[in-house]
Amino acid sequence: MKGKFLSFFFSEKVHFRHYFGGLSLLLVILQLLTGIFLIFFYDPALDNAYKSVQYLTNDVTGGGLLRNIHRWAAFLLFLAVIIHLIRCTLRWDFFNPAKRVLWLTGILLSLPIFLLVVTGLILPWEWKGYWFMEIIPNYFEFIPRIGSSLKAFFIDSFTLPRYQVIHILILPIVTLILIDYHFLDKLRQRGVFTYILRHTLLSLPFIIAVIVLSKYATIPSNDPQEIPMPLEGRYIPAPEWYFLILLLPLMYFKGKVVLILSIILPFLLFVILSILPYLYRGKKVPEGWDFLKKSRFRKLIKGVMVFLIFIAITALIYRGSYKSPTLGCNGCHHINNGFRMGVVPKQFKDRNVLPNLNDNLWMMGHWFYPDEIY
Ligand code: HEC
């Protein structure tokens, strides 16, 4: 009995090599389920969106918990994906012709997942969502030649219902198609439900972490009854951090340097990772590179390397973003401070009326140091 029980978890069908891949899948499923719940309460009308989010968070049974799970799972999903990517890279998966599609779809998947995070930040349409909506056009502005048209396009075309459709329909479809190509075929042969059941049990510590975090590290949304401190959320990780790290160069540099650091480098990284299997087409893992295979000791070394690279990447994200008071916007931006501070202005697309929105230094400064720059 005991043997059977253990073999349920540790059989060949569960690949610990893909523990974080499996965890990512579970988090995606969790996002789908909690997302479906949120759809029933969210109203994409400009002057009602945040109210509907407040209502769902504060007045609907379980609403606050599910919304915060949706937030924390998004944060952890990216971490799981990063670990999964490091492990697959250190296993030199891109040398394996049988894994070419797996590799490419895996890298491609990071894109819709990232865009889901970004659109998800905008939808609540409090000042945080408003800020993100405004900075995205500014971000694309740095691209030579087409930049200013792109900027105009993003500003003109923005409406909440459109972004809602992108967030709840278009991006999830793209994600699911890519996941299907990525590995569902293989999974179907092995049995999807057993796999998911097993991984759910194995991932229980993470799932419990998501729930505990969602219960205790919540996003303040009960203004004006409860008003957070203006600098609340400093040091508390949040999905916003992933996009903020891309924007960080805006605070220190201008022009071309921003273009290189914030757009060209991430883009190149994405392209190079995508085409790695094609660069190494037909080649074998070079002598010495496969030092990570086989013996237990080497496995341990590999584990340590994965851990160190992971720590380096997360430290970068943390170092870049820990000072952002992600939860404090409502500390000043609430209706008790007057209509101007409480409600996102109707002219939010008009940079002549709101010139600060064009000023990246101001925008970044206000996000990171809202008590000093406003
Ligand atoms: C210390 C108080 C305070 C905090 C905290 C604060 N803001 Fe502001 N914010 C202001 C003031 C004051 C203005 C200027 C309003 C004006 O021009 O009349 C402003 C303006 C803005 C603007 C410019 C556009 C506009 O309509 O004026 C945006 C965008 C914005 N805040 C977003 C945020 C976000 C996002 C956060 C949280 C990260 C945040 N604010 C936190 C005080 C604050």
Image (cartoon, grey):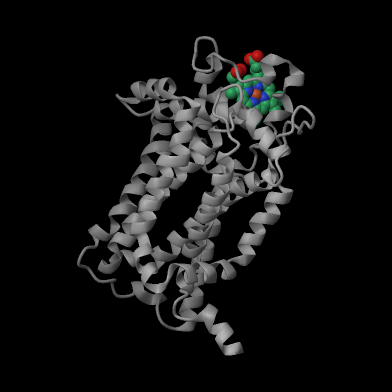
Along the line of sight, the residue nearer the viewer: 52 or 287:
52
The answer to whether residue 373 is visible is: no
Q: Residue furthest left?
A: 282
Residue 354: x percent and y percent?
55, 14
The image quarter containing residue 336 is: top right
Along the line of sight, the residue nearer the viewer: 206 or 279:
206
Residue 114: x percent and y percent?
46, 44
For the point 29% across and 57% down, the residue is 276
For the point 70% across and 40% down, the residue is 60
The image quarter containing residue 207 is: bottom right
Q: Which residue lies furthest to the top in this view?
A: 352
User: Which quadrant is the N terminus positioned in?
Assistant: bottom right
Report the label total: 0
The answer to whether residue 142 is visible is: yes
Q: Which corner quadrant of the figure contains ligand 1?
A: top right
For the point 42% across and 43% down, the residue is 171
Q: Which residue lies furthest to the right in this view?
A: 225
For the point 20% across and 67% down, the residue is 282
Residue 172: x percent and y percent?
43, 46
Classify 61 as above or below 18.
above
User: Which quadrant is the C terminus positioned in?
Assistant: top right
Residue 196: x percent and y percent?
50, 66
Question: As drawn, is 210 to the left or to the right of 298?
Answer: right
Classify 85 as above or below 328.
below
Classify 86 as above or below 47.
below
Classify 120 as above or below 16.
above
Question: As drawn, is 92 to the left or to the right of 71?
Answer: left
Question: As drawn, is 226 to the left or to the right of 274?
Answer: right
